[in-house]
Each structure stands twice: as structure tokens, then as C-alpha cells.
Image: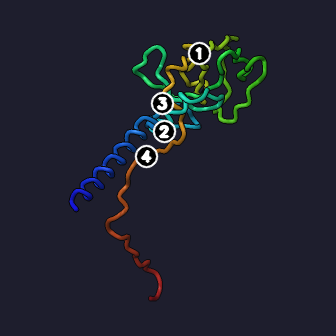
Amino acid sequence: MWHRLLLREAVHLFLILATVSLLHHTVGAFEVEGASMEPTLHSRQYVIVDTLLPRTRSLLRGEVIIFRFPRNPDVEYVKRVVGLPGETIAIAHGRVWINGQPLREPYVQELPRYIWGPGKVPGNAVFVLGDNRNSSSDSHLWGTVPVTNVVGRAILAWAPPVRWTWLGGQAPRVEAVDGGST
């Protein structure tokens, strides 16, 4: 009888460990630092990252990704994929141009006030920009991101409470106003 109980508990433990291992290798968390992705993401927000997807399919334009910074792989950045492998990118007249066509970007905080390119995205890389174009360190400053540097695709963001305020305590008192009959 105790053998069955022991076996059942061993199976439960195995399933729990397998689930935790699967989640560990397919989902991650990332804390946003800075304003480069505003208004989409804000500093101190947390992002759930799908770390499996980049290995199973190509990245898509418009996806928000987490990647190891090409100049310092110990640092991770969050940006939006704008240019795909083989495309020619230019930034001029307040717009991003892909192969000579303007890119529609409803998520951008303000139009870029700089000129870049044109330049071709290598076959093993993507061109990334922050949504806060004029306050972002991104591909227009330091180049493309090798696909091998991509950690994952952002799938969900949440913000922790910025400040806790205790609302308990003494109840307010109602004071009578003198000046009339009671």
C-alpha cells in the first residue's frame, strides 16, 4: 500500500519538475528600464517573454523583442522589430521607409527628428527601434541586431504598484457647524 503512495507522489513530483523546467525554458521575465519604448512600455514595467518562439519561426515586423545588446551581450534591451532581413531601411521626413514605402506606425510616441540611411538589413539580423524614437538607443545609432542575440518576444506587460499607501487608520470625524438650531 505505501509503495503505491510513494509511486504516486514520485509521479506528481516528476510532473511538477517537468512543468517548471518547461516553463523555465519557454518563458522568461524582463524589467523595462528607461523611456525608449513609451508609450507602449514604461520604465519599471515587467514583460513576460516567449523565449521559444524565436527558435521556431522568423520574427515579424512590429513585434516587441528582448535581445542581448550587440556591443555588450551581458545587457538586454527591449525594442520593436521594424526592418527584416534583406530589406532596405531609411528614416527621413519623420517616417520610417521600408524598400521605399512608408511604414504606418500607430504605436510611435512622436515622429523621428533625425535622418538615417538608407541601409540594407543583413540576412541574419533585424533592424529595431524604440517607440519613443527621439529618446531611444537603437539600430539607428548602433546597427542591426543579429537574430542569434534575440532572447524572445514580449507577450504581456504589467506594472507593479509604484507607491503603496496605507488607507486604514482613524476614521474622519464629522464636526458640527455652529450657526443654527440643532
Contact (Cβ within 8 Å) of mark 3 with mark 1? no
Q: Amino acid at mark 4?
A: Pro
The residue at the point 34 percent across, 44 percent down is 17
The answer to whether 30 appears left or right of 81 in the picture is: left
Label 3 to label 1: alpha-carbon separation: 28 Å
Label 4 to label 2: alpha-carbon separation: 11 Å
Mark number for residue 34? 3
Under circle 3, the secondary element is loop
The residue at the point 54 percent across, 33 percent down is 53
Which of discs 1 and 2 lies nearer the camera? The answer is: 1
Q: Amino acid at mark 2?
A: Val
The residue at the point 46 percent across, 22 percent down is 68
Contact (Cβ within 8 Å) of mark 4 with mark 3? no
Q: Amino acid at mark 1?
A: Asn
Q: Nearer the viewer, residue 74 or 35?
A: 74
Name the spot of residue 163 as percent of width and height, x first: 40, 48
Contact (Cβ within 8 Å) of mark 1 with mark 4? no
Answer with mark 3 or mark 2, whichever residue precedes in sequence: 3
Q: Name the residue beneath numbered marker 1.
A: 124
**138 above or below 62?**
above
The residue at the point 47 percent across, 19 percent down is 69
Which of discs 3 and 1 lies nearer the camera? The answer is: 1
